[in-house]
Amino acid sequence: MRRWTGRGGMAPHACVSAQALWWAWARAGGAAPAAQPKAWRAGWQSQVRIDEAGSEKRIVIIRSLAGATWSVTEWRWTPSERPATRRWQEGRWKLLAERAAQLGQPAEAAQGTREARMLRAVLDANLGPRAGEISGDILKWQADGLCLEVDGAAPGQQQLQLSYNADDSRLEQRAAMQLQLARRYPKAAWLTPFSLVPAAPQVRSGAKFYAIWQEAGVVAGQLWMPARAGGPLVRLRITTPLAPARPDAGAGAARQLVERELMALAARWAQAYE
């Protein structure tokens, strides 16, 4: 057993809290329960990771203490090869796991429409081993040294009747959508105009569209995913701030990162729901 204590809240040089970074460390390696979320929830006062799948067992408790202090406690156990010793160890480990489980907090159920709940599941899966944190409807996470943020899913009405069938997507339709965006964001520099997401090889799915722009020191990318039969249009937007001193210097890398994230989310949506 080993234990650390430290200050919670925003971690230095990070866009998520120290608790979120500890939770990402706790999740590293092993097999997590299917229902256990990957992103830290800002309202949690404690959380537990119990991993008993491998030859070495592991329990991690992250817990709030008084005065904005947090503790992180980890237990590791490799069962003895001697049957009598192993039975004694199993009894002790079972007691520890039962007590630890009492400190676990469930993630709040995703609110909103069916599409919003579906997209929240895709965002959680896309996080992978990275440190992420959810506060309200906002998910923040770190990738390649940048802070990314996405707001809650926003199903809406079809815009210019964006087609679910990629073969029906016309160049003039995409030009009209780009004109609408340019009017909405007149000061934006368009890094990627409104475009059709390239179809993944050997994957049959609906058409998806994206655009990436820079405005006021922020790179933003938006994804539009039409539904079959004119259903709700699923949209999400990822933003990342640029360095205030040289905002244009990092715009290229930020655009590439935002594009990778949008492409990954589009592929996960297609795989999960199409």
Image (cartoon, grey):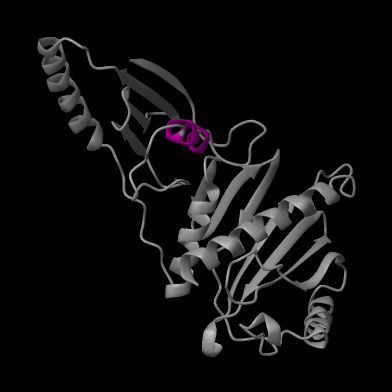
Q: Foreground: 119 or 152?
A: 119
Q: Foreground: 144 or 138?
A: 144
140 vs 159, left or right, is: left
In terms of secondary structure, what is the magenta stretch mainly?
Answer: helix
Magenta stretch: residue 204 in it?
Answer: no
Q: Is residue 6 above or below residue 51?
A: above
**Residue at image point 78% right, 55% down:** 218
Q: Position of residue 187 (x, y in %)?
A: 88, 68
Residue span colored magenta: 19-27
Q: Is residue 178 above or below residue 77?
A: below
Q: Residue furthest front?
A: 202
Residue 86 image-quadrant placement? top left
**Residue at image point 59% right, 77% down:** 206
Q: Is residue 84 above or below residue 194?
A: above
Total residue callouts? 0
Q: Position of residue 245 (x, y in %)?
A: 88, 42
Q: Which image quarter holds the N terminus? A: top left
Q: Position of residue 12 (x, y in %)?
A: 64, 30
Residue 103 image-quadrant placement? top left
**Residue at image point 48% right, 35% down:** 19
Q: Position of residue 53 (x, y in %)?
A: 30, 33
95 vs 175, left or right, is: left
